[in-house]
Image (spheres, helix red, strand yellow):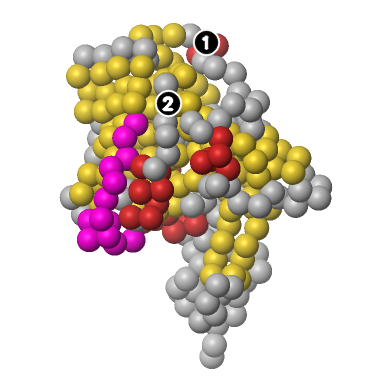
Amino acid sequence: MAYAFDPKHHYRMPTHFGPSLGPRQGLDGRRFSCKTNPLIKTFEATFEAEASQLEDLLPTGFKVFGEARLTIQFGIMMEVEWLAGRTYNVFGVSVPAHFEGKQDNIIGDFLLVLWENKADPIITGREDLGFSKVYCELPEPIVMDDRVECRASWDGHEFSTFSLRGKSSIDPEELPDSPSQGDMHLKYIPRTWTQGEADVHYPVLTAEETSHEVIEEAYKFEDASIKFKQSTWEQLPTLVHVVNGLADLKIGNCLSANLIVSRGGSDLSGQRPLV
């Protein structure tokens, strides 16, 4: 007898073995509170950029908000409950943006790309939520005195280096204020066997107010730098267009750089389409 889908549970491929497991659904439909985990270390820096280049990377309905800036984040996600306590790393690039739709008027951070070094968060974040997630190798940062270097590579080809220097402790209240109402994305799933058509194509919002994140420690850096290496197709057969697109950006001075140590978060079940 063919199996039937239970409308009370979430599925993704392969569906033949029952409801899927992930950050929003554990065994027997269990939910994860995200109140004491994950433990996250986020190295982040914001740089000057050229508005016209950033505008070219934003989809319809979005425009650069305020001064043109590019934000880089390298995060270490530890004690992740839905992965039974395991760790994975993330490396993201975003742009402050304004979305104006028929109903929604949102100021947030538009995520251009998010690399991760485990398949599980990529699959659950792309299909379920619409994050622009892809895979790469993200080793632990190199830390020497007050300097940090974060690296990203694919099959041994290092395509990006994110460096921060001059670390000092600060009160979390000293972190830069942000008008962001959350992270924004473009969810896109191509239609099978139909060139240039989509089954799914709409913007989505990860709202800030749904998070249980509590900042435990904060640090600032005197300066930071980001480098994307112009690469060949042979070096990055599926990522060369992304990396070279970022390498083409004219990135200016570092405006701020921080390390944030936080605990808790959200299962992102509050993710919603923007209209």
Q: Quick check: 223 left or right of 37? A: left
Question: Could you say which disc has been placed on residue 252 in the image?
Answer: 2
Q: Hey, which quadrant is residue 188 in on the image?
A: bottom right
- Mark 1 — residue? 174
Residue 36 sits inside the magenta stretch: no
Residue 186 seen in render = yes
Taking the spot 53% from the left edge, 24% from the top edge, the residue there is 214
Q: Residues within 10 Å of mark 1 (few under 14, many from 20)?
A: few
Q: Quick check: 228 left or right of 31? A: left
- Furthest residue in direction bottom, as rendered: 1
Q: Nearer the viewer, residue 252 or 30?
A: 252
Q: Quick check: 178 left or right of 243? A: right
Taking the spot 52% from the left edge, 10% from the top edge, the residue there is 174
Disc 1 residue type? Glu
Q: Nearer the viewer, residue 43 or 196?
A: 196
Q: What span is in magenta? A: 226-238
The total of numbered circles placed on residues is: 2
| 101 in relation to 227, above or below | below
**Residue 221 % position (x, y):** 37, 15
Residue 267 seen in render = no
